[in-house]
Protein backbone atom coordinates (compact mmCIF):
# COMPACT_ATOMS: atom_id res chain seq x y z
CA UNK A 1 0.00 0.00 0.00
CA UNK A 2 1.35 3.41 -0.97
CA UNK A 3 1.47 5.99 1.83
CA UNK A 4 1.93 9.72 1.42
CA UNK A 5 2.89 12.82 3.35
CA UNK A 6 2.59 16.44 2.27
CA UNK A 7 5.39 18.84 3.29
CA UNK A 8 4.78 22.52 2.43
CA UNK A 9 8.12 24.02 1.43
CA UNK A 10 9.60 27.41 0.64
CA UNK A 11 8.25 30.93 0.62
CA UNK A 12 5.55 29.91 -1.88
CA UNK A 13 4.51 26.97 0.31
CA UNK A 14 4.60 24.48 -2.53
CA UNK A 15 3.27 21.09 -1.54
CA UNK A 16 6.09 18.56 -1.70
CA UNK A 17 4.69 15.05 -1.43
CA UNK A 18 6.57 11.98 -0.27
CA UNK A 19 5.17 8.69 -1.55
CA UNK A 20 6.42 5.46 -0.05
CA UNK A 21 5.82 1.76 -0.35
CA UNK A 22 7.57 -0.26 2.32
CA UNK A 23 11.02 1.27 2.68
CA UNK A 24 11.20 2.82 -0.79
CA UNK A 25 10.20 6.44 -1.40
CA UNK A 26 9.59 8.90 -4.21
CA UNK A 27 9.68 12.66 -3.65
CA UNK A 28 7.35 14.80 -5.76
CA UNK A 29 8.10 18.51 -6.28
CA UNK A 30 10.90 19.28 -3.79
CA UNK A 31 10.51 23.02 -4.25
CA UNK A 32 12.74 24.13 -1.38
CA UNK A 33 13.73 23.13 2.18
CA UNK A 34 15.59 19.96 1.24
CA UNK A 35 16.58 19.57 4.89
CA UNK A 36 12.94 19.08 5.90
CA UNK A 37 12.39 16.50 3.18
CA UNK A 38 15.58 14.62 4.03
CA UNK A 39 14.70 14.64 7.73
CA UNK A 40 11.33 13.09 6.96
CA UNK A 41 12.97 10.33 4.92
CA UNK A 42 15.54 9.69 7.64
CA UNK A 43 13.00 9.64 10.48
CA UNK A 44 11.05 6.90 8.71
CA UNK A 45 14.09 5.00 7.43
CA UNK A 46 12.99 5.49 3.84
CA UNK A 47 15.32 5.00 0.88
CA UNK A 48 14.78 7.59 -1.85
CA UNK A 49 14.50 6.08 -5.33
CA UNK A 50 13.59 9.10 -7.48
CA UNK A 51 12.43 12.69 -7.67
CA UNK A 52 9.28 13.32 -9.71
CA UNK A 53 8.22 16.75 -10.96
CA UNK A 54 4.73 17.86 -11.91
CA UNK A 55 6.35 20.74 -13.82
CA UNK A 56 9.59 22.69 -14.00
CA UNK A 57 8.91 26.00 -12.25
CA UNK A 58 11.48 27.17 -9.70
CA UNK A 59 9.19 26.83 -6.68
CA UNK A 60 8.81 23.11 -7.40
CA UNK A 61 12.43 22.22 -8.21
CA UNK A 62 14.71 24.34 -6.05
CA UNK A 63 15.21 21.64 -3.42
CA UNK A 64 16.70 19.22 -5.96
CA UNK A 65 20.38 20.15 -5.38
CA UNK A 66 20.04 19.50 -1.65
CA UNK A 67 18.30 16.18 -2.30
CA UNK A 68 20.97 15.08 -4.77
CA UNK A 69 23.76 16.08 -2.40
CA UNK A 70 22.46 13.39 -0.06
CA UNK A 71 21.34 10.95 -2.80
CA UNK A 72 23.71 11.63 -5.73
CA UNK A 73 22.59 8.68 -7.84
CA UNK A 74 18.87 9.39 -7.74
CA UNK A 75 17.19 10.15 -11.09
CA UNK A 76 14.93 13.15 -11.64
CA UNK A 77 11.81 12.67 -13.76
CA UNK A 78 10.08 15.51 -15.60
CA UNK A 79 8.20 15.94 -18.85
CA UNK A 80 10.64 16.70 -21.69
CA UNK A 81 8.63 19.80 -22.63
CA UNK A 82 9.75 21.37 -19.35
CA UNK A 83 13.42 20.31 -19.45
CA UNK A 84 14.34 23.67 -20.98
CA UNK A 85 13.46 25.31 -17.66
CA UNK A 86 16.49 23.84 -15.92
CA UNK A 87 19.14 26.55 -15.87
CA UNK A 88 16.92 29.04 -17.68
CA UNK A 89 17.56 32.59 -16.38
CA UNK A 90 13.82 33.30 -16.16
CA UNK A 91 13.19 30.26 -13.96
CA UNK A 92 14.54 31.65 -10.72
CA UNK A 93 13.63 34.15 -8.03
CA UNK A 94 16.71 34.99 -5.95
CA UNK A 95 17.77 35.01 -3.24
CA UNK A 96 15.55 32.16 -2.05
CA UNK A 97 15.25 30.49 -5.44
CA UNK A 98 18.57 30.93 -7.28
CA UNK A 99 17.71 28.46 -10.02
CA UNK A 100 18.55 24.82 -10.66
CA UNK A 101 20.75 23.44 -13.42
CA UNK A 102 19.84 20.37 -15.41
CA UNK A 103 20.25 17.21 -13.29
CA UNK A 104 22.80 14.75 -14.61
CA UNK A 105 20.24 11.92 -14.65
CA UNK A 106 17.11 13.56 -16.05
CA UNK A 107 14.45 11.18 -17.36
CA UNK A 108 11.06 11.32 -19.03
CA UNK A 109 8.37 11.20 -16.35
CA UNK A 110 6.12 9.27 -18.73
CA UNK A 111 8.47 6.32 -18.10
CA UNK A 112 8.32 6.58 -14.32
CA UNK A 113 5.27 4.36 -13.83
CA UNK A 114 6.96 1.37 -15.47
CA UNK A 115 10.22 2.09 -13.65
CA UNK A 116 8.46 1.94 -10.26
CA UNK A 117 5.59 -0.54 -10.71
CA UNK A 118 5.16 -1.14 -6.97
CA UNK A 119 3.76 2.37 -6.61
CA UNK A 120 0.98 1.68 -9.09
CA UNK A 121 0.73 5.23 -10.37
CA UNK A 122 -0.01 6.76 -13.73
CA UNK A 123 1.18 10.02 -15.21
CA UNK A 124 -1.47 12.23 -16.80
CA UNK A 125 -0.26 14.86 -19.27
CA UNK A 126 -2.02 18.11 -18.34
CA UNK A 127 -0.44 21.05 -20.21
CA UNK A 128 -1.64 24.57 -19.59
CA UNK A 129 0.31 25.98 -16.65
CA UNK A 130 3.44 24.85 -18.50
CA UNK A 131 3.80 22.80 -21.70
CA UNK A 132 5.08 19.84 -19.68
CA UNK A 133 2.73 19.93 -16.71
CA UNK A 134 1.59 16.52 -15.50
CA UNK A 135 -0.54 15.08 -12.73
CA UNK A 136 0.40 11.91 -10.89
CA UNK A 137 -2.33 9.49 -9.84
CA UNK A 138 -1.93 6.55 -7.48
CA UNK A 139 -5.04 4.76 -6.28
CA UNK A 140 -7.62 7.42 -5.44
CA UNK A 141 -4.96 10.10 -4.90
CA UNK A 142 -4.19 12.76 -7.52
CA UNK A 143 -1.14 15.00 -7.22
CA UNK A 144 -2.27 17.84 -9.45
CA UNK A 145 0.74 20.16 -9.37
CA UNK A 146 -0.21 23.64 -10.53
CA UNK A 147 -2.91 22.40 -12.89
CA UNK A 148 -5.79 22.14 -10.42
CA UNK A 149 -6.16 24.01 -7.13
CA UNK A 150 -9.02 24.01 -4.64
CA UNK A 151 -11.44 26.45 -6.25
CA UNK A 152 -9.06 27.56 -9.00
CA UNK A 153 -6.38 26.50 -11.47
CA UNK A 154 -2.80 27.38 -12.25
CA UNK A 155 -1.83 30.59 -14.00
CA UNK A 156 -1.38 30.45 -17.75
CA UNK A 157 0.26 33.84 -18.29
CA UNK A 158 3.80 32.53 -17.80
CA UNK A 159 5.96 31.69 -20.85
CA UNK A 160 4.62 28.51 -22.41
CA UNK A 161 1.28 28.71 -20.63
CA UNK A 162 -1.98 28.22 -22.50
CA UNK A 163 -5.51 28.75 -21.22
CA UNK A 164 -6.89 26.63 -24.06
CA UNK A 165 -4.64 23.75 -23.00
CA UNK A 166 -5.56 24.32 -19.36
CA UNK A 167 -9.26 24.04 -20.10
CA UNK A 168 -8.72 20.77 -21.95
CA UNK A 169 -6.61 19.43 -19.09
CA UNK A 170 -9.20 20.40 -16.48
CA UNK A 171 -11.95 18.83 -18.57
CA UNK A 172 -9.98 15.58 -18.60
CA UNK A 173 -9.48 15.70 -14.82
CA UNK A 174 -13.21 16.28 -14.36
CA UNK A 175 -13.77 12.79 -15.77
CA UNK A 176 -11.85 11.14 -12.93
CA UNK A 177 -13.84 9.35 -10.20
CA UNK A 178 -15.62 11.92 -8.01
CA UNK A 179 -14.08 10.51 -4.85
CA UNK A 180 -10.54 11.16 -6.10
CA UNK A 181 -8.58 12.98 -3.39
CA UNK A 182 -6.56 15.87 -4.83
CA UNK A 183 -3.35 17.34 -3.40
CA UNK A 184 -2.56 20.48 -5.41
CA UNK A 185 0.82 22.10 -5.87
CA UNK A 186 -0.20 24.82 -3.41
CA UNK A 187 -2.95 25.19 -0.87
CA UNK A 188 -5.45 22.80 0.69
CA UNK A 189 -6.52 19.40 -0.53
CA UNK A 190 -9.82 18.85 -2.27
CA UNK A 191 -11.74 16.23 -4.26
CA UNK A 192 -12.75 15.96 -7.88
CA UNK A 193 -16.41 16.01 -6.83
CA UNK A 194 -15.96 19.27 -4.95
CA UNK A 195 -14.12 20.91 -7.84
CA UNK A 196 -16.63 19.79 -10.46
CA UNK A 197 -19.39 21.21 -8.28
CA UNK A 198 -17.82 24.54 -7.39
CA UNK A 199 -14.65 25.34 -9.35
CA UNK A 200 -15.50 27.95 -12.03
CA UNK A 201 -12.69 26.70 -14.27
CA UNK A 202 -13.80 23.07 -14.24
CA UNK A 203 -16.59 21.57 -16.31
CA UNK A 204 -17.65 18.01 -16.95
Image (cartoon, grey):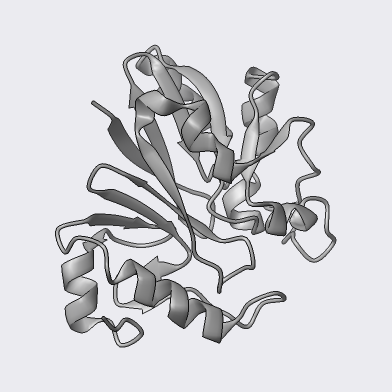
Q: In which quadrant will I find the N terminus?
A: top left
User: Which picture quadrant has residue 186?
Assistant: bottom left
Give above or below for 14 relative to 107.
Answer: below
Residue 44 versus residue 182: which sits nearer the camera?
Answer: 182
Q: Can residue 32 be seen in this snapshot?
A: no
Q: Does 181 sit left or right of 15 as displayed?
A: left
User: Which picture quadrant has residue 3?
Assistant: top left
| Residue 63 image position (x, y, % from top left) | 62, 40
Q: Does 196 sit left or right of 55 as displayed?
A: left
Q: In which quadrant will I find the C terminus?
A: bottom left
Q: Residue shown at 41%/16% (left/top)?
A: 46
Q: Residue shown at 63%/83% (left/top)?
A: 157
Residue 138 versus residue 54: which sits nearer the camera?
Answer: 138
| Residue 101 image position (x, y, % from top left) | 81, 44
| Residue 139 image position (x, y, % from top left) | 25, 42
Q: Does 153 sit left or right of 84 as displayed?
A: left
Q: Residue shown at 21%/56% (left/top)?
A: 180
Give above or below for 118 relative to 201.
Answer: above
Give above or below for 51 relative to 110.
Answer: above
| Residue 196 image position (x, y, % from top left) | 22, 77
Amino acid sequence: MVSHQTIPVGAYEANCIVLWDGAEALVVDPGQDADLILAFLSDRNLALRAVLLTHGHFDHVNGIPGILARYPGVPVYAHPSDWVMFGHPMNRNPPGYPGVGRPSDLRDIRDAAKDFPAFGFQVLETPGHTPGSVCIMTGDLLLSGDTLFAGSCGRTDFPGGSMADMRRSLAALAQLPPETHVIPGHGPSTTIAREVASNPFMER
